[in-house]
Image (cartoon, rainbow, N blue to C red):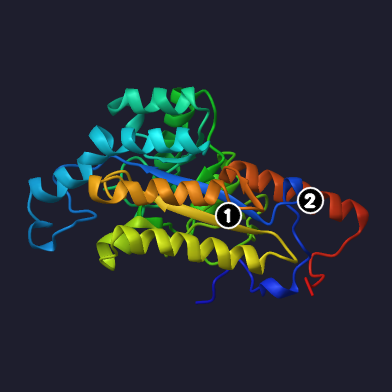
Amino acid sequence: MDNQLFTYSPIVDRAPIRWPGGERVAFYLGLNIEHYQVDKPSTSIFGGTANLAPDPLNYGWRDYGPRVGIWRMIKSLDRHGVRATALLNSDVCSRYPQIMQAGLDRDWAWVAHGRDNSTFEAGMTRDEERAYLTDVVDTIEAATGRRPRGWLGPALTETFETPSLLSELGLQYVLDWANDEQPYELTVPGMYSVPYSIELNDISLFASRSFTGPQFLQAVKDTLDQIHDDAADSGRVMALCVHPFSVSQPLRHRYFDEALEYIAGHEGVWLATADEILDAYRAQRGAEAEAGVEEGVPQH
């Protein structure tokens, strides 16, 4: 079947985007804060035991994140003035209250990321999924005092009903599709896609491709430099998506810190959150609509 959620739009055929302050690149740090069930397989560093229950090797690797890794990561975020976009499993709200408080103290943006990273919506009926999503969103709102505006499915999974159900719940964007460097409007009224990265992602680079820390740092630099050059005529988005149990292991963390230093010190970069990026995009497109500017005016 054909995809009904969005239409094809080549980036060179769009009206230019101008980010606040005239910056070329809108950057956000997607911080995955997740809880895993102990008796289900998930992201693993060693496949040989991944289907065992319990699986101390892989579960312990993941559990390093909330126990140790995230606290090392928070120091670097604070050092470089980067405010996280927290991609939050709702079970984190009750299970890791110290992490929640750290995020509240720093005014992180909160994106709903499912109940836990062991539960996917595949196979749910529309009513079952509505109840599931309602619980996730309401739980995060109760814990943060702010209703999440964005959604990232665990393992970037959705059903065909997910965007419309999220819209019913008042959400405005999804990160799941990872197919662009600019936000764009979905066919579901009031819903948008905001860029996410499965390439510039520590799980993809370290667990799947066996990158070293220096290679990770170079990948970040190469990505930013290329996007910055491409954004001369129209603003673009760079997402750096990370997991504390991966990039903030001791053998890698210094390179994550150096990556943040490079990004924060780079000319033409707006340090933002996913929420702020959507707001800036919608404000500009809304102003253009009022002025009668057509969406499809090319960048060149």
Q: Can residue 178 be seen by looking at this rendering?
A: no
59 relative position to 22: left or right = left
Which residue is disc 2 drawn over?
A: 284
Query: Which mark, by number, is residue 61?
Result: none
Q: Residue at x 42, y 44 (%)?
A: 31
Q: Can residue 96 be seen by looking at this rendering?
A: yes
Which residue is disc 1 drawn over?
A: 194
Q: Residue at x 50, y 51 (%)?
A: 262
Q: Residue at x 37, y 60 (%)?
A: 216
Element type at marker 2? helix
Q: Amino acid at mark 1?
A: Val
Q: Would you identify the image quadrant in which residue 188 lies?
A: bottom right
- Looking at the image, how many numbered discs can be counted on the residues? 2
Locate the C terminus by quadrant.
Answer: bottom right
Which percent across, then down, holds residue 15? Answer: 79, 65
Q: Amino acid at mark 2?
A: Gln
161 relative position to 266: left or right = left
150 relative to 208, above or below: above
Which of 211/100 is in front? 211
